[in-house]
Image (cartoon, helix red, strand yellow):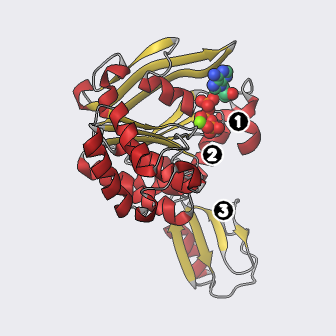
Amino acid sequence: MSEGNLAISAQGLVKRFGERRVVDGVDLAVPRGAIYGVLGPNGAGKTTTLRMLLGIIDPDEGRRAVFGLDAPRDASDRIGYLPEERGLYPAMKAREAIAFMGALRGLDWKTGRVRAAEMMEAAGLGHAIDQKIRKLSKGMAQLVQLLGSVVHRPDLLVLDEPFSGLDPVNQEKLEALILAERDRGATILFSTHIMAHAERICDRLAIIASGKRRFEGTVDEARATLPQQVRYTPAHPGIDLATLLPADAESDGRAWRFQLPPQGIEPLLVTLIERGHGIAGLSIERPGLHDAFVRIVGQAAAGNVTHAEPAGAFA
Ligand SMILES: Nc1ncnc2c1ncn2[C@@H]1O[C@H](COP(=O)(O)OP(=O)(O)OP(=O)(O)O)[C@@H](O)[C@H]1O
Ligand SMILES: [Mg+2]
């Protein structure tokens, strides 16, 4: 894809803190108009990467461009950002806080106030428009900050762990907001540990572990890194079929689970039917993004013993 079609491009980004290369040669290409997920375990380097992309910190090596600009801060008014550490002025009223965030990105206050009220109503927060931030619950304050990051209608929205701290209803509202922003024409880059959201809304994603990019592609491509799983229920449960089925087959007493053999399922089914075991149930499923994530991150940890920190949680 040519640079002109990219909202963000980065090559070989490196960030060192002391002796540690916490981001170690990351490439990223985020197409315009995409919803792009940056996934990775705690300490992987996601926040550091996002901060470099936004120009909050400079990389030690490598280059990045936002909308073709080598200094991302030059695109500041076209960007909305929800940082990992949330924070609004506690004494400000919610509507003012949103208008204030817009003003920091070049939006006039009057428009900001009008949009803030409209957006809060639409998000079901109409009752809190004139409430001070300090009186809002943590999740409500986070939603207000999120609205503040989109009030100036940015072309690029960068959200660091936007789902964490939200209840399931508000997580769904946030998904809807991200999709609406995409439909408006914005590009969205977000980090998350919550695979279900990434699985539903990402057009593409990158998995980072120990500062390196371990995967890049679509959700389906990530899931395709794992073999499909067969779930087979014989007509007469209770018979030990271990010698007929692949070596990894496990039974819960009724159904058997095993990886889809490379030659497909048909030869096996023929054998099972010939031997009179029959088929009471059969499904073939691709494991979800969660399993793909665990495997990709686990492999990264196994191959990289010098960064033991993320490995502990996922090995
Ligand atoms: N300013 C800093 N000084 C020293 N080390 C830092 C600094 N910022 C981050 N680190 C370290 O860099 C590594 C990557 O941190 P980062 O915050 O980018 O991870 P992350 O992927 O966002 O993790 P999480 O999922 O927990 O948010 C961590 O080991 C962290 O301790
Ligand atoms: Mg982080």
Quadrant (top left, top right, bottom left, bottom right) of the C terminus: top right
Disc on res. 246: 3
Q: Is residue 289 left or right of residue 115?
A: right
Report which residue position mark 1 lands on: 310
Residue 218 at least partly seen: no
Find residue 285 and report its horizontal and vertical position in percent: 52, 65
Residue 88 at least partly seen: yes
The amino acid type, in three-letter code, at marker 2 is: Arg
Nearer the observer: mark 2 or 1; the answer is 1
| Mark 3 close to ligand 1, CB under 8 Å | no
* Residue 249, quarter of picture: bottom right
Report which residue position mark 2 lands on: 295
Q: Is residue 298 left or right of residue 118?
A: right
Q: Is residue 76 left or right of residue 17?
A: left
Which residue occupies the foreground of this view, 238 or 254?
254
Label 2: which secondary element: helix
